[in-house]
Amino acid sequence: MTELLERAIARVRALPDAMQDDAARMLLLFAGEADEPVYRLTPEEEADLAPSLAQAERGEFATDEQVRAVWAKHGP
């Protein structure tokens, strides 16, 4: 196991059980194990996401300047 993966697993172990399960599902899917179900959006989540998907379909994306402004305000 690589050092990076060991570090990530150590961090995930400290998360609440539900978040640990979410991380495990993502890792299993990434590794090609499809036994775990893919997350399904609730109708409310789909409705919340619909406007953003429509913008993307129209090719409406944030400009580089807008992205830089967000990173400046909320970045690492």
Image (tube, rainbow, N blue to C red):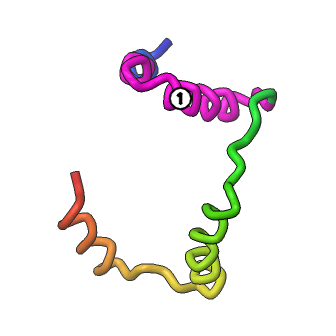
Residue 8 position in % (x across, y down): 41, 24
Q: Verify whether residue 35 appears in magenta.
A: no
Residue 7 position in % (x across, y down): 37, 20
Residue 36 position in % (x across, y down): 75, 30
Q: In the structure shown, which secondary structural element does the residue marked by tag 1 occupy? A: helix
Residue 50 position in % (x across, y down): 63, 74
Comparing 44 with 14, the one in front is 44
Q: Give the range drawn in magenta.
A: 9-34
Q: Is residue 30 above or below residue 73?
A: above
Q: Which amino acid does label 1 sit on?
A: Ala
Comparing 30 with 46, the one in front is 46
Can you name the residue that lies furthest to the right here? 35
Q: Quadrant of residue 42?
A: bottom right
Q: Quadrant of residue 55?
A: bottom right
Q: Residues within 10 Å of mark 1 (few under 14, many from 20)?
A: few
* Position of residue 17 in the picture relative to residue 3 (left or right): right
**Residue displayed at 42% across by 15% down:** 6
Q: In this view, does 73 lie above or below 14?
A: below
* Position of residue 43 in the picture relative to residue 34 (left or right): left
Mark 1 lies on residue: 18
* Position of residue 30 in the picture relative to residue 19 (left or right): right
